[in-house]
Amino acid sequence: MDFAGAYSADNLKFLLDGLYVTLIVAFTAIILSFLLGCIIGVVRYAKVPVLSQISFVFVELIRNLPLLLIIFFMRFALPEVGIKLGLMTAAIAALTIFEGAMISEIVRGGLTSVDKGQIEAGRSSGLTGVQTLWHIVLPQGLRRMVPPLVSQFISLLKDTSLAVIISLAELMHNAGIIIGHGYNYTIPILLLVALIYFTVNYLLSLLSKRLETKNA
Amino acid sequence: MKKSWKLLSVMMIAMLLILAGCGSNNEGEGNAAKGESGADGIATIKERGKLLVGVKFDTKLFGLKDPASGKVEGFDIDISKAIAKHILGDENAIELKEVTSKTRIPMLNNGEIDMVVATMTITEERKKEVDFSDVYFQAGQSLLVKKGSPIKGIADITKDSTVLGSKGSTSVKNIKEKVPGVTVLEFDNYQDAFTALKTGKGDALTTDDAILYGMAAQDPNYEVVGEPFTDEPYGIAVQKGNSAVVKAINDTLAELKSSGEYDKIYEKWIGKTPAK
């Protein structure tokens, strides 16, 4: 083990470059998958004809496939049918589709958990179905979704490391290159990478706790 | 519940049919594209003015990215540059794209790279998917020992020797076949095996010499001894049917060998001249 050699300034900067890519991919995918998940979740909650059935098939199909397969599909199967994505776009697209399917179930569950009496009250006070959803059901449902959503976002951030399979230059990938320089760097580098992932994700869960107490 | 099962199966079948349709369409196109590049793969490269090469970024001595400079360096890169010089007249008219053992064949067949120079062993199975150049690096299983060790090659390994290796690897199987009755200590990874060698738990460490040279490069007190006793020929892979590019690569390799440049590159990375 060579901690001093492993933690040289160049190596640390190289790891930070990787972390930057990880964070860009993670936060873009978090935003996009949240949007996708909300749309699908609401469509399925409101049982919009046709769209709801399509969404059902989409969600069941995607969440029963390994994410690794979806990443590989985006990178190597889509170009076969003429759709060429960059490395980062392929990773973001795969994460968005996969996590979006997961999040849609969280959203649907959150909405369903809102008491029926609330909807009846909304409708009988003259609100339309959409207004009831927007003003009554969504605000209450969203609050309940916060904890499962944040744990989904944390898994998303960790799942970005799977993009190492397509050589995206994220944190794990750059760690692998540094380890390639010396067998005795393995333990120091992996420990540091673990610490980085832990810190970022722990900050996310702290944020979630604050959101919960604020909304309670 | 029953209804959703029906719905799900109908949609799945529809999707499979669509995908199958795309697949068969694409097969025709793919072959056409391949035939084209096979005819004038060199013209495509010249038109682009740049050679696209798939190399490893994490393999010591062959293709390793330097975190400080961001440059990728190694034996494979020097060979790639020579090929770029041969085809385009400029060794810097090259773009290195990272490949791994899992991505190199798909990337080659997608047309993202012109060739794979990435410690790729020529095997019959791979020949069904890609075409290979002549051997550009003759790798094989070898022995790493402390400098000054009485072991100078596989012939010096006897029943009384202790050899270190990696658990379940073919190299452990090979050494047991070569020297029946030899003691082999197996470790989870090469790092542990190398540490064991340093602490004197064994007389020699065995695996592919390409990995052993990387270890020797890290610690000058250790050296690779003897000729490889198994055959792992590394070749440069191109899309199937791309004979013009294979020829350009083979011409480059022949030039490098006759001019002595190959030996220089070899010595620069491996630390000794190649076996004749």
Image (cartoon, coloured by chain):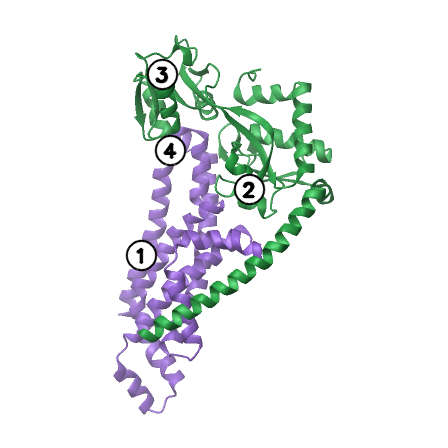
Chain colours: A purple, B green
Residue situated in front as seen by the camera: B148 or A148: B148
Label 2 Cα neighbours within 10 Å, binned few <14 / some 14-19 / many ≥20: some
Q: Position of residue A30 (x, y in %)?
A: 42, 60
Tag in front: 4 or 1: 4
Q: Which residue is mark 2?
A: B129
Please give the label number shown on residue B179. 3
Q: Earlier in the sequence, mark 4 or mark 1?
A: 4
The kind of residue tagged 2 is Glu
The kind of residue tagged 4 is Thr
Q: Report how far apart the C-alphas of labels 3 and 1 lie in the structure.
A: 57 Å
Picture residue at 46% right of the left edge, 14% below the top:
B226
The kind of residue tagged 1 is Ser
Tag in front: 4 or 3: 3
Q: Report how far apart the C-alphas of labels 4 and 2 lie in the structure.
A: 34 Å
Picture residue at 56% right of the left edge, 27% below the top:
B75
Q: Which residue is mark 1?
A: A205
Discs 1 and 2 carry the same chain letter: no
**Residue A137 higher or lower than B248, as above or below:** below
| Callout 1: chain | A
